Amino acid sequence: MEDRIMKPQQQTKIETKGLNLFYGDFQALRDVNFEIKECSITALIGPSGCGKSSLLRLFNRMNDLIPGTRVEGDILLDGKSIYQKDMDVVTLRKRVGMVFQKPNPFPMSVYDNIAFGPKHFGVKKAKELEAIVEKSLREVALWDEVKSQLHKPAFDLAPGEQQRLCIARALAIKPEVLLMDESCSALDPESTQKIEDLMQEIAKTYTIVIVTHNMEQAARVSDMTAFMMMADDKAGQLVEYAPTAQLFSNPKDKRTEDYITGRFG
Ligand SMILES: Nc1ncnc2c1ncn2[C@@H]1O[C@H](COP(=O)(O)OP(=O)(O)OP(=O)(O)O)[C@@H](O)[C@H]1O
């Protein structure tokens, strides 16, 4: 973790300002304010139901798809509101990609899974697509494993390989930010290790935000950790946000300390 201390010159990639989220009458997030630096790994941790996934989904407006959702406050990406009128949500989701808890390859070949996004965004030449497929699979260290099975169904891969394929699929459209919602929780320890190594590698180029229940994982891979908790009315709040080493070794808030020492879960 030592060699991933935040560099002071890193720009702010995402900033939330007075962020409130409502599902109908229920307030799921209250007054969340924080900044995520580019090319860093930020972990969102906290007890079940405190709003980690909801917050993550706001960064590429996936919550727009849930009827009855209302957002107050703002989220800035490179200093520009993602809610401003001329923000095209498809472009936003191209810039801010997402990998889910369970591997969800498309029901098509390994090759087509990766080529799908670039084709959608206008890449037509076969040679160019081939290069993107190879580069994306190399980025997730999957190329050597699958180069002889590119035209086999993605479902034939092992779960850990499928998840790396899903990460490669997300990277193929050149996002700037990658959101990972419990992306290792359905995997065995060896596959988890591979994905954690991969996160460290790709964070040199991409800004990564992860939701994890696994505090060891947050401590191992992230630069910054945000601890969230529910208030009495169940609205999620950001309790403490600090460099990961500091948050785990010297938490400032008693609630953070109680959580990381396992006094409540
Ligand atoms: N689509 C939805 N409609 C209504 N309420 C929702 C919806 N999604 C989440 N919630 C509620 O919002 C709150 C926060 O949920 P969220 O899933 O974001 O928390 P979480 O911290 O990610 O939880 P977990 O760790 O269990 O995944 C919870 O009370 C949940 O029931």
Image: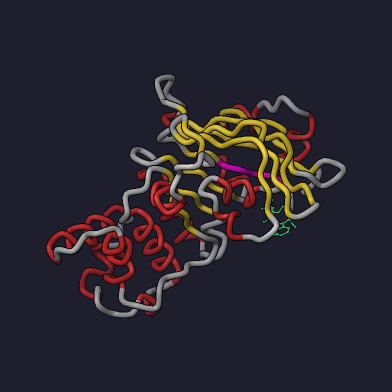
- Between 201 and 39, the one lying in front of the other is 39
Q: Main secondary structure of the magenta part?
A: strand
- Between 195 and 231, the one lying in front of the other is 231
Q: Is residue 162 above or below residue 9?
A: below
Left or right of 104? Residue 141 is left
How are the colours assigned in the image? secondary structure
Q: Residue at x 60, y 30 (%)?
A: 34
Place of residue 249 in the rendered image (x, y in percent of width and height, measured from the top left): 64, 29
Q: Is residue 141 above or below residue 7?
A: below
- Between 107 and 218, the one lying in front of the other is 107
Is residue 45 covered in magenta? yes
Q: Residue at x 44, y 52 (%)?
A: 93
Q: Residue at x 41, y 25 (%)?
A: 10
Place of residue 108 in the rendered image (x, y in percent of width and height, measured from the top left): 34, 77
Left or right of 111? Residue 246 is right
Place of residue 243 in the rendered image (x, y in percent of width and height, measured from the top left): 56, 28
Residue 203 visible somewhere in the drawing: yes
Q: Please, which residue is most extreme toward the front here?
A: 85
Image quadrant assignment for residue 248: top right
Q: Quadrant of ligand 1?
A: bottom right
Q: Is residue 28 above or below residue 108?
A: above
Please state the total of marks drawn on the protein image.
0
Image quadrant assignment for residue 241: top right
Left or right of 141? Residue 31 is right
Place of residue 165 in the rendered image (x, y in percent of width and height, measured from the top left): 37, 64
Range of magenta residues? 43-47
Residue 47 visible somewhere in the drawing: no
Is residue 114 covered in magenta? no
Q: Residue at x 51, y 64 (%)?
A: 188
- Between 22 and 232, the one lying in front of the other is 22
